[in-house]
């Protein structure tokens, strides 16, 4: 199956060789038209118009941006792609516009009808028809001409296969099946508007046609790389397909132990690591999707070398707060990195590399990761990758038979043993067996190092504390933390706090807190005095005296209808 998005180049070529000269012949006295590719990403056009003189006037436009076979434009050190647009949601009958059609509309809207008696010269021709400027303007201003997503190999190859519904009418229609991927789509307001063209579909003559009608051909590039796909809930498949495009690449890629058979030959496609994973609770460290990593696993997930791939710099060191995900839509944040000696161990003494709680499996229903876990054990023991294509995963009986032949438990459950640092005697077994095996995990581009912000650097990213956070702290009895969060470290004290930190130990700020002081000030402007008396808040009516403004006529109080307001501040 040819997965190259050829429709970009075909549409552009048709525009340059057919529709553009036809449009010019209608609007100007066209006497000659020649066009040709001058490079992998540029074209040249020579246009001649007839004049009253013997010789026609010519103008040549060089280095016009053009897409390559992959649908990519290289403009001023930036890679762009133009996303096709469908007229409506029923893709069986919708008209699809690609880059050539959009350029035609762009030029047609700007090219005026020339009068028959215009005194043509080269300056007038270039002013009347600034093709080079129009091409550049389209690439810079059109919402469909987008900077290529270069997060990783997969993201860079999916972006040119995107499709945008110009006027969405329904979330799903029968005409979408087999033409766009049912899983690769946004989770937010663009749900039902942005799709990924299926592997077995192509754009031809303004239509999105199916060229192969098989279950796998109906998937997009990302979804077709998810093994055991039929065992996962669709919501989690959507997350898994999208998060694979967020994986940060490695300078030294590692292929997955469990594959689908649809992966490309490009080594840089692989953006994860095969980690010995155990599904079990590990105290507060696995609460709310917390992930516990071993020190060696964190080092394997790090990328201390500068990558030379086209997607750019890949340097990073994995640390607590980084977000990991697997191909089945499971995601979590690294809560703790433990020395290998402090991780639970298998019977042979090998430490587990990643711990994730199994509590979420019953409601998320992404049990495909458990099947991959078992197939990963088989692949690691046999020393060869196991193929589990979507909708063709090995059966339970086959998996059990292969595990038994390798001398491993048929259900993939095994008893792990506590390290001495976790309490009890070294080698003490856990109370219940755990699902243990190899899963393919990737590091997403949500790194804690990039998320950390300081108020002094950018006020937009300051740490905000609202009512819910206050209630949590109050229930925990963390009164001093409340005082620190809402008063001492509040934004209203940042000047004083900086001086205190520079001087040494910081003491708690006195009452009132900055936000309460602001509230009291605003209430006072409306004649309401708020005061703390014996630990309780009291409100009294008291006309303002500071910066007071006497009204010409008393009015009804905006908050207390039975009262009148004669003075405001």
Image: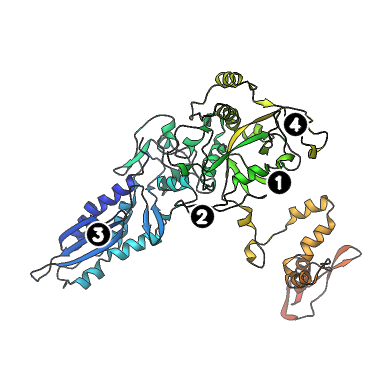
Contact between labelled residues 1 and 3, with CB atoms less than 8 Å apart: no
Q: Secondary structure at mark 4?
A: loop
Residue carrying label 4: 417
Q: Position of residue 526 (x, y in %)?
A: 75, 72
Contact between labelled residues 2 and 3, with CB atoms less than 8 Å apart: no
- Identify which residue is drawn at 21% across, 69% down: 125
Q: Which mark is residue 205?
A: none
| Image quarter (top left, top right, bottom left or bottom right) of the N terminus | top left
Rounded to the nearest angstrom, the CA distance separating label 3 from label 4 is: 70 Å
Question: Is label 1 or label 2 in front?
Answer: 2
Question: Is label 3 or label 4 in front?
Answer: 4
Q: Earlier in the sequence, mark 3 or mark 1?
A: 3
Q: Secondary structure at mark 2?
A: loop
Residue carrying label 1: 336
Q: Earlier in the sequence, mark 3 or mark 4?
A: 3
Residue carrying label 3: 44
> Seen in the image, is 287 located left or right of residue 309?
right
Q: Residues within 10 Å of mark 4 (few under 14, many from 20)?
A: many
Rounded to the nearest angstrom, the CA distance separating label 1 from label 2 is: 26 Å
Vertical arrangement, residue 465 with respect to residue 329, above or below: below
Depth check: give the residue in front, 210 or 444.
444
Contact between labelled residues 2 and 1, with CB atoms less than 8 Å apart: no
């Amino acid at each position: 199956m040819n997965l190259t998005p050829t429709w970009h180049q075909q549409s552009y070529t048709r525009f340059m060789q057919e529709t553009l000269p036809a449009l010019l012949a209608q609007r100007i006295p066209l006497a000659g038209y020649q066009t040709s590719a001058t490079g992998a990403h540029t074209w040249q056009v020579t246009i001649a118009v007839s004049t009253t003189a013997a010789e026609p006037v010519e103008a040549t436009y060089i280095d016009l941006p053009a897409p390559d076979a992959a649908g990519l434009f290289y403009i001023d050190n930036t890679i762009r792609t133009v996303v096709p647009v469908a007229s409506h949601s029923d893709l069986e009958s919708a008209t699809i516009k690609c880059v050539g059609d959009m350029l035609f509309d762009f030029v047609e809207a700007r090219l005026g009808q020339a009068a028959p008696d215009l005194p043509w010269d080269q300056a007038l021709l270039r002013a009347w028809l600034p093709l080079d400027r129009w091409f550049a303007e389209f690439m810079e201003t059109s919402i469909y001409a987008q900077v290529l997503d270069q997060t990783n190999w997969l993201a860079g190859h999916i972006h040119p296969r995107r499709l945008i519904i110009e006027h969405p009418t329904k979330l799903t229609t029968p005409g979408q099946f087999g033409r766009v991927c049912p899983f690769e789509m946004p989770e937010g307001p663009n749900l039902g508007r942005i799709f990924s063209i299926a592997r077995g579909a192509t754009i031809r003559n303004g239509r999105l046609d199916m060229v192969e009608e098989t279950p796998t051909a109906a998937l997009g590039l990302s979804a077709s790389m998810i093994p055991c796909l039929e065992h996962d809930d669709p919501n989690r498949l959507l997350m898994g397909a999208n998060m694979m495009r967020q994986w940060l690449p490695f300078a030294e890629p590692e292929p997955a132990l469990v594959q689908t058979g649809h992966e490309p030959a490009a080594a840089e496609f692989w953006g994860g690591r095969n980690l010995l994973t155990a599904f079990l609770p590990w105290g507060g460290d696995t609460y709310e999707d917390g992930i516990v990593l071993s020190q060696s696993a964190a080092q394997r997930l790090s990328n201390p070398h500068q990558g030379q791939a086209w997607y750019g710099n890949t340097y990073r060191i994995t640390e607590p707060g980084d977000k990991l995900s697997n191909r089945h839509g499971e995601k979590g944040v690294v809560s703790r990195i433990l020395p290998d000696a402090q991780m639970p161990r298998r019977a042979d003494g090998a430490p587990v590399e990643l711990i994730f709680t199994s509590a979420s499996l019953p409601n998320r229903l992404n049990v495909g990761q458990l099947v991959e876990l078992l197939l990963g054990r088989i692949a690691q023991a046999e020393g060869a990758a196991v193929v589990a294509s979507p909708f063709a995963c090995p059966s339970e009986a086959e998996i059990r038979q292969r595990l038994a032949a390798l001398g491993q438990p048929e259900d993939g459950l095994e008893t792990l043993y506590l390290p001495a640092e976790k309490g009890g005697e070294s080698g003490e077994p856990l109370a219940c067996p755990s699902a243990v095996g190899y899963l393919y995990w990737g590091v997403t581009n949500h790194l804690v190092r990039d998320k950390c912000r300081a108020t002094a650097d950018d006020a937009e990213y300051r740490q905000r504390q609202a009512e819910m956070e206050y209630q949590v702290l109050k229930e925990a009895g963390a009164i001093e933390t409340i005082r620190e969060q809402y008063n001492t470290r509040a934004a209203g004290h940042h000047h004083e706090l900086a001086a205190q930190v520079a001087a040494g130990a910081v003491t708690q700020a006195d009452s009132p807190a900055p936000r309460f002081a602001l509230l009291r000030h605003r209430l006072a402007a409306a004649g309401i005095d708020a005061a703390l008396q014996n630990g309780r808040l009291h409100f009294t009516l008291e006309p303002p005296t500071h910066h007071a403004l006497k009204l010409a006529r008393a009015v009804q109080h905006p908050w207390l209808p039975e009262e009148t307001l004669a003075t405001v501040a």
